[in-house]
Structure formats: C-alpha cells, structure tokens
C-alpha cells in the first residue's frame, strides 16, 4: 500500500524526505501522561492554532514515542501548539477528549481503539464545530463517529498478510497474543491471521505487566508444544514472547506487529522472523498536518477515504536500511 492518496505539497514533501517504506497499534494499560509541545521550524503557536492529540498510550510503550515524535515535528513545521495527553483506560480517554473540547482547541486528533466508549466525547467535539481526525485505531468506525479523516493501517489486511506469510512457511498452530481487552485493532489483526492460518488460537494477556505476559506465555508454551508460531501485536510483547519461548523450551517462531530499536535488532539477528510496520511516526505527523491544512485551507486529505500508512513487512531483506531510523523514532 502507498501514501498516494495524500494531498498537499507539504505532506508529499515530508513523505519523500522520510523515504519511509509503507506498512496497530500497540496497546496496554497504565497511567495517563500529558505533554504540551511546539516550536521548531515555526514559532510555537505562530499559526494561531492549538491542536490536541489524545491517545490510548500505555506509558513506557516505545510505539507511542514514534507517534509523538511525528506529531511534534508536524507542530514545529506548521507553527501549531500541540497538546498531547493519553490514558489507556477508555473512559478516561473520553474525559481527555472532553477536556480538549472544553478548552476550545482548534482541532482534535485521537485514537479510536474503543469507539463505543469514545463516541459521546467525539460527538461533543463535532457539536462544538471542532474538527476531529482519527489515527492508529478505528479505521472502520471513524466516519460513524464523525471524524473527518483517518491515518493508519487496515488491521484486518495486516493480520491477513501475516497469516498468509506464516501459512506459506508451514504454520499449523499459531498463537495470537492480544494484550488489551476490547481493542478493535488487536482483535482485527488476530481475526485476519486466523482467516489465512485457520489453526490460529488467541490468548489474552495483561499488556500492562511484562512479567505477567511472560509468565502467561511461558505456561501456555510449556503446556502445548504444538504451537509453532507466536504472533505478538506490539514490539514490547514480542520481547516478552522471546523470553517466554526460551524459558519454556519452545521451538515456536516469533513474528510481531510494530517496531522499535530492540525488535529491529532481533529481526537483524534472526530471532524475530519479521515485523509488520504501520509507521506510527507518519500517523502522528499526518494527523497534525491534516488538521492544520483543514483549518487553514479546508483541505481534505484522503478524499473521504482512510490514508493507509501500512502494512509493510520488515525482515532480513530490508532491516539494514530500516534499523538506523528505529533509533531516531522516525520508523
């Protein structure tokens, strides 16, 4: 998939500069953090716009560093004041969206991983004439909730792609690890994998607690030696799976969604077969820039369709090129 639908010279330029090959999100459950950012190429706030970004980030999950890095760079480039906040608890994320509405920001970018729980607060934004764009999660729900645009990966397609690849490699009994209950993105990934690799079994773990993830997977792998692939849906969970696999004496191969510097190194070393990247940096960048262009010019990025930033396979054939960018939070 490509970013060919992206309109606007500024967005096209950044995509070219980044030279990023295209590719959900990584979820969990810890505490809220808040960050106000601006500055850089243009003076912070020089555009006159304040944009709020609200996500379901689990603090400590490196995936979100890339989302924020992209959003902050866009804010600098456009002279936007960026207000970032997050909470993995759906009801608390809804409160953060409502807080942004009450503070009269000019635009809101939000993840929609639990769309039903966020519908009321998103409606409050649209009722207040505040434009909303979705990113990272909620590709099938964003228009129903009233969001104007969406930037992310089609998680069903991504899951199916993973399933097809491991099925072609001989997978008979993959284990798909869901690390946040109720996440539509994670469920779509596992459902896609199962559609292509029918022997896929799901397991629920507590993504907020790495030691719990490791022990749960270790017990499962020790109990069932027929598991031949472990599909993790976030880079930190893949690291937990590698520990569990070794402790259980399992020969299962590990594949994952999403990327960080550690997992990129594991791919290069051959310990992780491949990663499916959705380019979170691009998601963060385009979410902020699209709102800026909408507010300034009335631009509609994507023409009423989601802008796809993935999926893309990262494996031994391209890891040498991609690895350096993982260390700067741009890939």
Image (cartoon, helix red, strand yellow):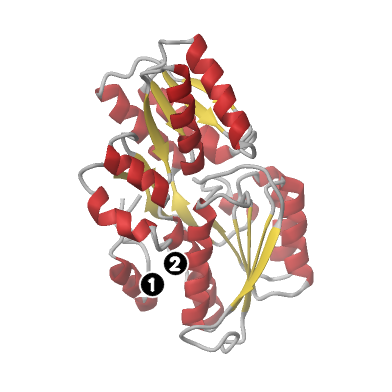
Name the residue located 51 percent from the left edge and 46 percent from the top edge: 25
Instruction: Work out whether residue 297 can be spotted.
Output: no
Viewer-proximal residue among 230 and 280: 230
Task: Please give left or right for residue 30 compared with residue 184 in the image.
Answer: right
Q: Earlier in the sequence, mark 1 or mark 2?
A: 1
Task: Please give left or right for residue 80 compared with residue 167 in the image.
Answer: right
- Dot 2: what SS? loop
Instruction: Work out whether residue 201 can be spotted.
Output: yes
Q: CA distance from mark 1 to mark 2?
A: 9 Å
- The vertical placement of 19 against 213, above or below, is below
Name the residue located 49 percent from the left edge and 70 percent from the top edge: 290
Q: How many marks?
A: 2
Residue 163 coordinates in the image, percent (x, y): 36, 28
- The vertical placement of 38 against 210, above or below, is below
Task: Please give left or right for residue 77 compared with residue 165 in the image.
Answer: right
Q: Quadrant of residue 309?
A: bottom left
Give the number of the disc on residue 301: 2
Residue at the farthest left position: 317
Name the residue located 62 percent from the left edge and 42 percent from the top edge: 28
Residue 178 coordinates in the image, percent (x, y): 55, 31
Residue at the farthest front position: 247
Give the number of the disc on residue 11: 1
Residue 320 coordinates in the image, percent (x, y): 24, 52
Task: Please give left or right for residue 88 compared with residue 139 in the image.
Answer: right
- The vertical placement of 105 against 147, above or below, is below
Residue 172 coordinates in the image, percent (x, y): 35, 15
């Amino acid at each position: 998939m490509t970013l060919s639908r992206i309109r606007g010279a500024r967005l096209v330029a950044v995509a070219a500069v980044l030279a990023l090959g295209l590719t959900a999100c990584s979820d969990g459950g810890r505490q809220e953090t808040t960050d106000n950012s601006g500055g850089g190429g243009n003076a912070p706030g020089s555009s006159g716009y304040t944009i709020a970004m609200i996500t379901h980030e689990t603090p400590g999950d490196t995936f979100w560093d890339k989302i924020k890095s992209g959003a902050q760079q866009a804010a600098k480039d456009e002279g936007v004041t960026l207000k970032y906040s997050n909470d993995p608890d759906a009801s608390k994320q809804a409160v953060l969206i409502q807080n942004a509405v009450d503070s009269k920001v000019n635009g809101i970018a939000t993840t929609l991983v639990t769309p039903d729980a966020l519908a009321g607060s998103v409606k409050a934004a649209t009722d207040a004439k505040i434009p909303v764009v979705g990113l990272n999660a909620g590709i099938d729900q964003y228009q129903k909730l009233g969001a104007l645009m969406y930037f992310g990966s089609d998680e069903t397609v991504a899951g199916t792609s993973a399933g097809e690849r491991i099925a072609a490699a001989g997978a008979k009994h993959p284990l798909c690890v869901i690390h946040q209950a109720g996440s539509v993105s994670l469920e779509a990934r596992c459902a896609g994998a199962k559609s292509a690799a029918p022997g896929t079994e799901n397991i629920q773990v507590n993504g907020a607690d790495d030691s719990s993830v490791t022990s749960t997977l270790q017990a499962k792998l020790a109990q069932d030696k027929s598991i031949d692939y472990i599909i993790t849906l976030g880079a930190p969970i893949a690291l937990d799976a590698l520990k569990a696999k070794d402790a259980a004496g399992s020969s299962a191969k590990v594949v994952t969604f999403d990327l960080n510097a550690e997992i990129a190194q594991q791919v290069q070393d051959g310990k992780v077969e491949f990663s499916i990247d959705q380019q979170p940096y691009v998601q963060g960048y385009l979410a902020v820039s699209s709102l800026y262009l909408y507010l300034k010019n009335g631009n509609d990025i994507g023409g009423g369709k989601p802008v796809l930033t993935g999926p893309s396979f990262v494996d031994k054939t391209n890891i040498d090129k991609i690895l350096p960018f993982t260390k700067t939070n741009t890939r």
